[in-house]
Amino acid sequence: MHKYSKQIRLLLAVDCIIFGFDGETLKILLIKRGFQPEKGNWSLMGGFVQPNESIDQAASRILKQLTGLDGVYLEQLHTFGDTGRDPIERTASVAYFALIDIHQYETQLSNDYHAEWFPLQHIPKLVFDHQEMVEAAKRRIRYKAALHPILFELLPPKFTLPQLQILYESVFNTTIDKRNFSKRVLATGLLIKLNDKDKAGSKRGAYYYQLNMQHYYAKFQAFLNFIPNPDTLHL
Amino acid sequence: MHKYSKQIRLLLAVDCIIFGFDGETLKILLIKRGFQPEKGNWSLMGGFVQPNESIDQAASRILKQLTGLDGVYLEQLHTFGDTGRDPIERTASVAYFALIDIHQYETQLSNDYHAEWFPLQHIPKLVFDHQEMVEAAKRRIRYKAALHPILFELLPPKFTLPQLQILYESVFNTTIDKRNFSKRVLATGLLIKLNDKDKAGSKRGAYYYQLNMQHYYAKFQAFLNFIPNPDTLHL
DNA sequence: ATTATTAAGTGTTTATAATACAATAAAACA
DNA sequence: TGTTTTATTGTATTATAAACACTTAATAAT
């Protein structure tokens, strides 16, 4: 150990920006930090990378710790490593963003962490540079969602077109013509129409859809034809 | 110091994938690793993050060390942190990719590192997980170049349309109709036509262009209209 | 001087995709 | 039975992308 002499070692942390959608607005999950410094202040869920795990594994572990969820969409966002970002000791932090189905989120687990969902428009003051991480995550989810079908990760396995549209409108903070929306989304071939309806939102009821998972993986790079598959790209 | 007890500290490195364009093919700059382990094998240029610098600063420093260049395009790519990626001691590495004007590259500096340019199609076997880093960088430069005008960073301040087209064709490994290419590129308003010509490539000579830097920064997010500005995106 | 050679530069037509826009249908409830 | 509410569906127009070939400028050769 310590064969590269004269080099500093530092702490490596992981912080997760966890997105959820409650049917109306896009939210992120924050906790009250349980130890010093900044104990009791709002923070992203995080933790230190352990000796026996990769950074990706650390992120999965931390996400499961808070939400109880496995196998959710989790993507490395950016690594933050300014010298003074943690006042106690030099720590670099790899930020990940996660998209979860908010209905599968297990409240009882998070009681230990005093977790709360906050709408993107009303994020409280956060510890360290977590504000900056959240801003980067907001930019990334918009950017990525404009090109790839990631927003389905925020919905339950069965969802309706109106639900999907509200989600897109919420993420991009805009309104979309529903005729054009359904045309474009259905034209991707990613959705399978089911026979039952969701009667919660209206008297008539809206048909449920589910993802065609084969098409989903095949078309992940080319969703909405905003961009052809970068590996076969012709200008 | 060491106030977060019981946590491991580890080494944090930076590795740079440096792209250059010689007028014909896209290349990356590799060095012969100068110390153990894997001494003498081909490697990305890298180094450890120092106590007094941020990760971004470390990347700039390492890039300048090899190329002599300041203020070049440098973007954080991904952080690699599998437990066994460095056999000597646990090291996480933040990979950056850089785009430089190959003609400004100072050969004499790199003699110390035994650096060489390799075409993307003929990358030798690399140390550790550097192969994986290069693959990620290749995907990223294509993805980003399809949406944003980053490829200009690879050209000298004055360049011709044929040069630019060859660059795009090289990056995307395709051929482009020159009438459509010039129409699209000029329609962005990013280029200023100059009065002098480059006579090197043909008898007639091709007009030089340079970037309109104001438009460049303003339109960076919306180049080619592949994607509207994500911050004002309407679907 | 004329001709040949080479790469640069330029327009139009067609096809495809995006946008704007409103009436009808289904179910529940009064 | 009518009223209310939300889901569902189509067309006309506009904008963008793609396909396609000839002319021009400069040099080199005869």
Image: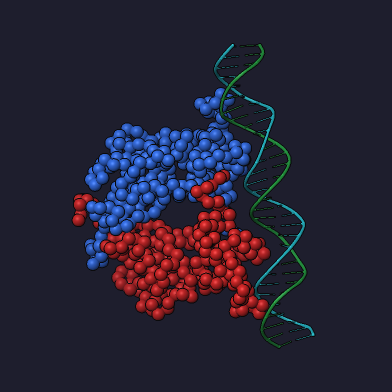
Chain colours: A red, B blue, C green, D cyan
Residue at image location 57% in from the left, 40% down from the top:
B176
The picture places residue A201, in percent across and down from the top left corner, at: 61, 77
Quadrant location of residue B99? top left
In the foreground, B171 or A85: B171
Quadrant of residue B64 within the rendered picture:
top left
Q: Is residue A131 left or right of residue A159?
A: left
- Residue A164 in picture, x, y percent from top left: 58, 68
Check the image and report above or below for A8 versus A175.
Answer: above
Quadrant for the N terminus of chain A, please. Answer: bottom left
Residue drawn at x 45%, y 61% as measured from the top left: A137
Q: Residue at x 59, y 64 (%)?
A: A174
Residue B67 on image: x %, y %: 35, 39
Q: Is residue A183 above or below residue B144?
A: below
Total numbered circles? 0
Residue at coordinates 42% horizontally, 34% vertically from top-left? Answer: B103
Instruction: Judge whether residue A139 can be spotted in this image.
Output: no
Residue B211, horizontal then vertical, whole percent: 53, 40
